Amino acid sequence: MMMFDQTVLRPAASVLVVEDQALMREAIVDALVQEGFDVRAVQDGAGFDQAFSQQRPALVVVDWGLPDVDGTAIVERVSREPDIGVVMLTGRGGLEHRLQGLQRGADAYLVKPVDWRELVLTVRAILRRLDASAFQPPHQEMRFEPRLFRVVSPAGHVIELNAQECVLLECLLRRPGEVVPKDALMEALGAHGDAWGEPRLAQTVSRLRRKFEAHDSQWQPLRTVHRVGYAFDPAGAGPRPT
């Protein structure tokens, strides 16, 4: 049965749990289901292959030590899908294990025993970031790929972004073509109420514009509305910013 997020009336995000220990698997499923996620669970790599082929999840939670495959192999496979998140949840808490899990492509690395609130908040944070991919222009000429920290311009140029630029662009793309107030953008950047918040926002916008111009001089998607905020037109229409 399809589950729905009651706050926004849309299908709940699908999460696939890969965990070989039955009690832990059930606990993870219960924690996520209680928060409104649509959860499926399997106990090994073979189960993952079957479940993944039947229905692509929005996010995968995977243990490291599975009976038939190394969990990092699943992480690496999932990480090649830019619209699917992956969380490692494992008992291996050493620094080298953490680094290896993240290097193989995990969006987050949590160590057992974990507070279920931390797991839920981690899953939500990753899905919020990935959800920016849903805010693409209808013509699909410009692509925003937040997981890969990049934008592909209408001309096909790949433009690398840093974390702040990604956050700013995600916020703007939630309201494409509309003016987003400076306060909302500064809050997204974690600079609301900071004396340097507005200069920091302006610097981030300026960096984005320079990157866009360097890769595609004909594409000018960022527009400034003096003293109000900024708008992002994915097609790059409108006058050149001053």
Image (spheres, helix red, strand yellow):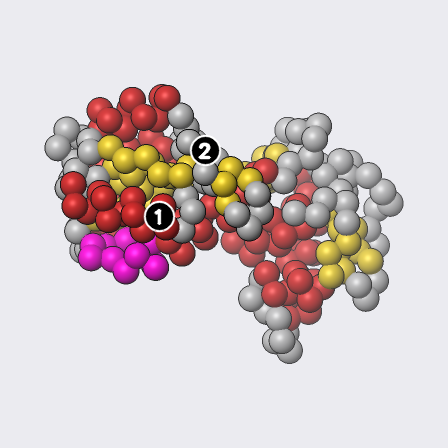
Q: Assess whether residue 116 is covered by the magenta stretch.
A: yes
Q: Residues within 10 Å of mark 2 (few under 14, many from 20)?
A: few
Which residue sits furthest right? 239
Q: Secondary structure at mark 2?
A: loop
The one nearer the camera, 232 or 49, is 49
Answer yes or no: is residue 9 visible.
yes
Give the image location of residue 221, x and y in percent: 75, 43
**Chain part drawn in magenta:** 110-119
For disc 1, the neighbor class at 10 Å (few under 14, some 14 to 19, many from 20) is: some
Residue type marked 2: Met
Based on the picture, tell me whether residue 117 belongs to the magenta stretch. yes
69 vs 190: above or below: above
Quadrant in the picture for residue 93 = bottom left
| Residue pictured at 69% horizontal, 56% vertical | 206
- Label 2 to label 1: alpha-carbon separation: 15 Å
Give the labeled residue for mark 2.
Answer: 2
Q: Quadrant of the N terminus?
A: top left
Q: What label does residue 126 carry, if any?
A: none
Nearest-to-viewer mark from 2 and 1: 2
At 36% across and 46% down in the image, what residue appears?
A: 33
Q: Residue at x 84, y 54 (%)?
A: 242
Q: Which residue is mark 1?
A: 32
